Image (tube, rainbow, N blue to C red):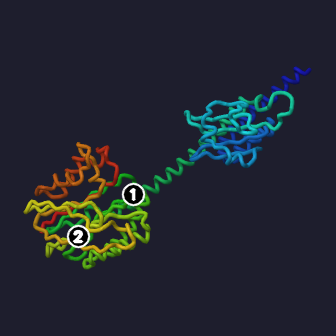
Amino acid sequence: MRKKKTSVDRLQISRFKLDSLLDITLSINDNLPTEDLLSKYESILRNKLGIGKIIIFKHSLRWECILNAGFPEEFETGIDVENKLLKYNETEIRNKNLGIEGVEILIPIFSNNTPLAFILIGDIEEDRKGMSPVIRHLNFVKTISGIIIAAIENKRLFMESLRQEALKKELELAAEMQQKLIPDNRSMPVNEKLRITGFYYPHYEVGGDYYDCIRLSPSKTGFCIADVSGKGIAAAILMSNFQAGFRALFTSDIELETLVIKLNDLIWTNAEGDKFITFFVARYDHQTAILEYLNAGHNPPVFFNNESRQLTHLHSQCIGIGMIDEMPPVKHEVLYVTANSKIVCYTDGLSDLKGDNGKEILTSEIVKHIKNKMPVEENVKKMLDKLGIPDNNPGLFDDVSIIAADFIK
């Protein structure tokens, strides 16, 4: 009679386990929230199998407790998963080396050799006769635990993919909007006195480089190039703010010193020293052939006088915009431009590239390509082709921007 009863009990428990696995599987297929899945899991183990205590530590961005059923609250923060549990990769039963009071079973859950979770189990019915329910149903506990953890991880990965997709779309929109801040070459001044061209390549979807060109009066044209310290969205946001300020302030008669001071006030107010902007600005009057310029910590543009064959690097006269709250005294410089001269302004994404000798190219490629009578637009194109920018240079690690001009006079 007892044997028959034992067989019936085993059959019942087997049916219960199958029904439980089916219920969990259907719940996963129905996309139940993580909290509901854990509630079902806890009910199966504690209420149906008589397992007293369960705690689960799962890794997402960090290790955290996602279920505590029966253990003291201090277990949630008191167990150092990194130092205490990561060394275990197999189920441990009553291992005294665990050194965790009340824990009889440790079940690690792995995926592709990466630990996803650790399940700690204790049995409050230790004094009853016979085998502990934890031990008796261990294979089932491991199976259902693996299913639950895998489901929760899949939900996390799915939500992460949605967030990544949303971020990607936001970045694409930000890149599109930022691209509109950079003037198209078709809108650049091209006439019998002046030809300006530009090249813009953000290393990521959005970047911290910026250049601009503005017709300030019938005879005066202003242009600039700038680079925000750092990369990514924060740099792009600050640069868009800078662009708005620059366009509002730059006029045909504003002193370049005053322009730089006002822009410094703007960036310091917005960034408070966390970021700064290197900046080169110039204003050319084709009636007088005078080029005024001011370099605020930017890479020195290269100026080539085609009559004298002389090269000049327009070095910095002051620190970058937004480095300190009050810009030190600064004075702009003046160049008298002869016919067929050229200027190439660039960001450090170009100058920091490594040459064949392993050293930074600085302005060597610019100098090599502009010492001729070809239009500077062709010079820039040939230089970029030679350097494999943007698609064929594995050493490219930053935004690359160039604005260049032919002074035809």
Q: How many marks?
A: 2
Residue placed most toward the observer, 318 or 64: 318
Disc 2, SS: strand
Q: Are marks 1 and 2 in contact (CB under 8 Å)?
A: no
Q: CA distance from mark 1 to mark 2?
A: 25 Å
Residue visible at 9% across and 59% down in the picture: 309
Query: Residue 301 occupies which quadrant of the picture?
Result: bottom left
Work out whether 245 lies above or below 385: below
Residue placed most toward the observer, 168 or 274: 274
Residue visible at 34% across and 72% down in the picture: 327
Q: Which residue is mark 1?
A: 230
On the image, the x and y values in percent for residue 83 come to 61, 40
On the image, the x and y values in percent for residue 57 come to 65, 43
Work out whether 37 lies above or below 254: above
Query: Residue 405 occupies which quadrant of the picture?
Result: bottom left
Residue placed most toward the observer, 118 or 370: 118
Residue reaching furthest left?
307
Q: Which quadrant, please, contains the C terminus?
A: bottom left
Residue reaching furthest right?
1
Disc 1, SS: loop
Crowding at label 1, few (<14), some or many (≥20) Cα neighbours within 10 Å? some
Amino acid type, callout 2: Tyr
Residue reaching furthest bottom?
253
Crowding at label 2, few (<14), some or many (≥20) Cα neighbours within 10 Å? many
Work out whether 227 lies above or below 126: below
Q: Which quadrant, please, contains the N terminus?
A: top right
Between disc 1 and disc 2, whose residue precedes?
1
Residue visible at 39% across and 54% down in the picture: 205
Amino acid type, callout 1: Gly
On the image, the x and y values in percent for residue 28 come to 66, 41
> Left or right of 278: which side holds 67?
right
Q: Which residue is mark 2?
A: 293
